[in-house]
Amino acid sequence: MLQESELLHRLKSYDPTFDGALVSRAYHFSQNAHGDQIRASGESYFSHPLEVASILLDLKLDCFSIITALLHDTVEDTLATLEEIKQQFGAEIGRLVDGVTKLSRLELQSEETKQAENFQKLVLAMSSDIRVLLVKLADRVHNMRTLNHIIDDSKRRRIARETMEIYAPLAERMGMHSLKDELEDLSFATLNAEMHQSIKTRLDFLREASENAIGFILEDLKRVLDEASIKGTINGRLKTPYSIWRKIQRKSITFEQLSDIMAFRIIVETNPECYQVLGTIHSQYLVVPGRFKDYISTSKPNGYQSLHTGVIGPLNQRIEVQIRTKDMNRISELGVAAHWQYKKGGPVHDGKQYAWLRSLLEILEQASSPEEFLEHTKLEMFQDQVFCFTPQGELISLPKGATPIDFAYAIHSEVGDRAVGAKINGRQMPLRSVLNNGDQVEITTYQNQCPSPTWERFVVTGKARARIRRFIRSQQRDQFKELGKSLLQKVCMKEGVTYSEKAIGLAVKHFQFDMIDDLLAAIGEGIQSAREVVTIAYPNSQKKELKTDQPEGEIPKIAPKAEGGKHPSLSIEGLIPGMAVHFAGCCHPLPGDTIRGIVVTGSGVTIHTFDCESLHTIDPDRLLDLSWHTTNRNQNMRHVGRLKVTFINKAGSLAGMSTAITKHQGNIVNLKIINRTVDFWDLIVDIEVKDVEHLIHIKTVLRSLAIIHNADRI
């Protein structure tokens, strides 16, 4: 257990001006408050705040953070009060202790309440002072270290899952890689104990077997630096079980196929020396293609900087080498704690290192529910990054797979809302194009543009998706409101009463809505019955039965017409002679496709492609395995194939596409515009062709045209 003298000595080593008397008073206050309390592990409860303080001392946090760590459980678990804390230690420490206490109370309730609500409050708490999260992270680290003492297996797994999904990504975003690695590995040990133990056993074996190998590689790397007259320190380690498991999952390989489970770190004095070491390493060893990453010129959003490269090192072993300066290494280990921004009196979310926190706060404003907020936040935190530039050279970091719409929203919400086009590296490209590292992106905006609902299909950032969904909700609400009003007026007419918003207003309070617009929208959405509202609003009206079997407020469903028509004499093997046949409009099967049939009572058989999603919901007893007759195919019969085409919006593009299709014996039978921007049009084109090969040929021809950006079968 950490003694008072040791605690004071460690704090003084990096903060000589700290208030030693205040820290000592907090030490004894916590010790007396917890008294004889015992943890599940059997240790004194006071050992827990001491361990939390010790973790923060390793991160070299300020005096107030250490005091908060000592006191963080006193209000929740002892007779001490928040007012007592404020009186003895000041308002700032009282505020920090209060923030951590509220988060602890949320955790205690997390079996009954939703994780999403807890995380929403966590983001709000850390937005006021980042030290609240730092103390909470240290608290979670020690709790995870002692998690095995909790008897309830379901509770252990819940805590581990929450740690993996929330706290580990937060630690990474704050640049605290050592805490992130430990939290992930401890969670993995609980969530997948068998696999964790299996990998750990193999690593222990490799550690013993390769102890000499690691030493040999370290010596050889030192030789390389000495020959280049570069001074630096080198250390090596085996990767953690969780990082190895994640690589196995990501690359779909076995443990035996892993070749870079050893990582070596070279620490030098200056940035130029980092690149000098890189050149020296690459000149001495074979480089593994695709493994070089430069996080010095383009640092990660959390401030992390380093050069990463993979080489075939001594003994022909693949190794990972990280090259950085002492300052970079300090920031890598301490993360946000290395900046000391919170001591300067400004808001904690100033500065580039807090851009991710500002992004979370913006998502919080846009999301309609805690669950949606958590969903969007996971999108932000879990994906790898790509780095793109504005025309002015400003660096924008985005999740992997991001599009120009994500880029536009990352610049500003208004830019995203009004985006109509994008240039990537000077070339006009569709808004759904996937961005790559180093792309320069220029967004074209239009004052009267608004977000398109189709954007939600391809954006990947939480901020973009939250903003688009907010617009869609607003748009849908207006539509539901108008539909609800129309349904009410219809019921009023049937009841022989005059529609009046004043009368309808009487039903608002009865059904516990805030405004009449809320009630109308609920009716339009089908949440509230229009007849029930009329019954409450006009209690003395004559009740009439609706002269329809259709449920109240429901739009009559019209059965879709069969597409493709009947073909009683098709060359299809597996059909009963004389059975009527229809081609499905969802997948447009063509001769040459693998096909199946659905028996439809009274209508014959509907033909689908073998992989059509419509088949997933069909009773297997109604499915027929069919095939096209290859020797007696009717070449004069025409079939409809469907293409999705994206072409450049300029004069003659549509005519050029039509001419190319006609020239190659295709016939356009239907054409639908599904998306239109200033620069590109997306079309659905139905074409009569002989078979699937004919359609593929036309698709290839279209792709070869300069006016066509893309063409795919759907």
Image (cartoon, rainbow, N blue to C red):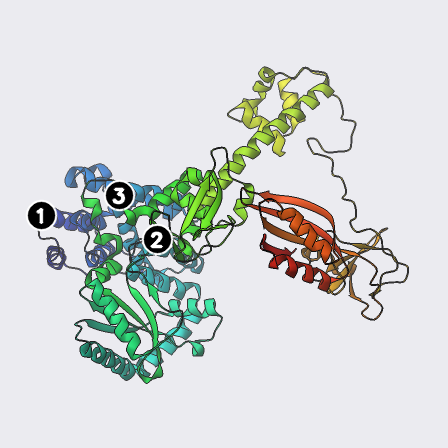
Q: In which quarter of the image is the C terminus?
A: bottom right
- First along the sequence among labels 1 and 2: 1
| Residue furthest right in the image | 578
How far is mark 3 from mark 2, CA to CA?
15 Å
Q: Dot 2: within a 10 Å radius of its alpha carbon, few (fewer than 14), some, or many (20 or more) residues?
A: many
Disc 2 is placed on an element classified as: helix
Residue at 77% x, 63% y is 591
Taking depth in this image into account, of 373 and 633 the one nearest to the observer is 633
How far is mark 1 from mark 3, CA to CA?
27 Å
Q: What residue type is labelled 3?
A: Val
Taking depth in this image into account, of 476 and 684 the one nearest to the observer is 684
- First along the sequence among labels 1 and 3: 1
Q: Dot 3: within a 10 Å radius of its alpha carbon, few (fewer than 14), some, or many (20 or more) residues?
A: many
Q: Which mark is residue 170?
A: 2
Residue 700 point in image, percent of width and height: 64, 61
Q: Which mark is residue 348?
A: 3
Is any atom of residue 647 visible in this view?
yes
Q: In which quarter of the image is the N terminus?
A: bottom left
Mark 3 or mark 2, whichever is nearer to me: 3
Residue 547 sits above or below residue 677 on the image: above
Mark 1 or mark 3, whichever is nearer to me: 3
Residue carrying label 1? 21
Residue at 76% x, 26% y is 546
Taking depth in this image into account, of 418 and 247 the one nearest to the observer is 418
Residue 321 sits above or below residue 566 on the image: below
Q: In which quarter of the image is residue 363?
A: top left
Q: What residue type is labelled 2?
A: Leu
Q: Residue 115 carries which label?
A: none
Question: In the rendered view, does 142 fall on the left or right side of 665?
Answer: left
